[in-house]
Image (spheres, grey):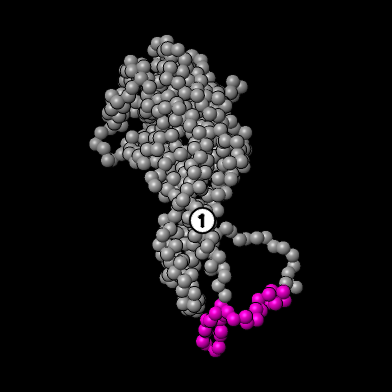
Amino acid sequence: MTSLSLLFPDPQDPRRTDHEPMKGYFIDLNLDQILTAITESFPDYGLENVFYHNLHSINEIRYRQEIFQDLENKEILEGFRTFSSTLRSVRRTLGSLERLYNPWHRQGWVLESARVYVNAVEDLLAMLTKSALRSRGFKSLREYTAWYRESDQFQNLKREIETLSQELASIRYSIIIKGLSVRVKKYQAEPDYSSDIEAFFSRFRQGDTKNYLVKMSEPVGLSSVETQILSGVASLYPDTFTHLQHFCETYGSYIDETIDTAERELQFYITYLDYIQPVKMMGLPFCYPDFNTEKKIEISDLFDLVLAKKLAGASTSVVTNDVSISGKERIVVITGPNQGGKTTFSRSVGQIHHLGSLGLPVPASSATLLLFDTIYTHFEREETTKSQRGRLHEELISLHRDLKHASGTSLFVLNEVFSSTTLKDALFLSTKILEQILELDAVAICVTFLDELATLNDRIVSMVSGINLMDPSIRTFKVIRKPADGLAYARSIAEKYHLTYDWIHKRLRQKHISSDPETAVLQHETPEEVRK
């Protein structure tokens, strides 16, 4: 049967493998760190193929959002966790059977794994049936699972498992051990001492202990004696073991492809929920964004998810911000002092757009986002010896290429471009870039040290990173909508670390430093401190 994709609106998503166009902005926006954390537990699931490709249809985004909303029900989430864990256990068992050399032992594990699989499917259907589902994806999964359970394929499998299990359970045999010889024969009403032994040792029981058993253990090989015993039993009951062999030949690939696909797709949802759970426990908000093509962006309480994840459990609080553009506004220019959170803010805008376009809950209390086609990022990078061109040359080529391919629904995140050139050239080049973005009617977030860019025309919004008015050396990390003020507050930083002209002059005037540190005559300073 051909596999169906029930939990993804676009069944081609997990099959696309061309990641190169996205890798650049994944690194710039720290999305690669989210991807690594989410996919490391399931490296063979192909989840990176899904996370790399954003959806371009509001209906498809809503499809995934509905599934996440259903998973907010803890009973539904835990039910899917149990199903997923069981199916993974079945797969691991089938994958390890090649290590078992005894054919009867191997076939017995095929039967056992099939029994666990059948029970997992029925438990899944029971959970889906009793749950108040709202998502189209889970409703489709419930409908398919109900159909599959009543299909001849499933019913025949279930019937064969029950019949074979009864046949195997009815087998009785005796083991005769004499010296180093072991002989197997059919049971002929010899005394059964097992109950007596159990009753004898029960007196030493000291109460119930924790049950460490799992639903299904991993197959392990048999010893040479066990192998001979099993082969002997098979020769005593040839009909039953021939039936077992026929079962394995008939149902060697018993896992339904659509059920198998659904379990793998589930991990896209579950792993992301696990990733954001520590952040939610910090009290930070997540929401399901709306999307539009009218170039309107309204985000409240936005924060950098990667940064928040790193701070989870720490005493440091995460600062949230708001951003808004509407009407004819297209570009947000962010200025302000260094280390004020400008880059983090721009990165979080890019993050929320990509995460939202995957149908994921996003880090904000509310959000209306641009339904973009592509994100283009330009962050400062170190020069490498691989290229014979300088940093400025590389920036110009990259920006030219992106502007050539961009459209009116593209999103640009520019972080201090042209910082490697002169102020005059940087202003000239940056102005040309923003003008071309406006000509495309695209949307951009631009972090810059050039205040003049914030006043190019009325389609540009100016935002400034804030400082503590009582102590300008302290950054609030709040980025607010206001005209650029041209203040870098560099003096407050120099004052904080005693690096102003007055401080340096005062120290030089008060201290006499000898040319030989070993014989230095200083107030309150040792030769070692002089060297520093």
- Using the image, determine if residue 336 lies above or below residue 165: above
Considering every residue shown, the one lying at the far top of the view is: 458
- Using the image, determine if residue 165 lies above or below residue 487: below
Indicate the quadrant where residue 129 lies: top right
The percent coordinates of residue 254 (x first, y second) are: 44, 55
Mark 1 closeness class: few <14, some 14–19, many ≥20 residues within 10 Å = some
Q: Is residue 48 visible?
A: no
- Using the image, determine if residue 136 lies above or below residue 122: above
14 sits to left or right of 131: left
The percent coordinates of residue 271 (x first, y second) are: 51, 43
Indicate the quadrant where residue 203 lies: bottom right
Give whichever of 466, 235 is nearer the camera. Answer: 235
Three-letter code for the amino acid on which mark 1 is drawn: Lys
The percent coordinates of residue 150 (x first, y second) are: 50, 47
Residue for point 28% across, 27% down: 401
- Using the image, determine if residue 200 lies above or below residue 310: below
Which residue in the structure is indicated by mark 1? 158
Residue for point 57% across, 68% down: 169
464 sits to left or right of 285: left
- Indicate whether residue 202 is drawn in magenta: no
At numbered mark 1, what does the secondary structure look like: helix, strand or loop?
Answer: helix
Give whichever of 485, 516 is nearer the camera. Answer: 485
Residue for point 57% across, 70% down: 170
Give whichever of 463, 29 is nearer the camera. Answer: 29
Give the magenta range: 173-201
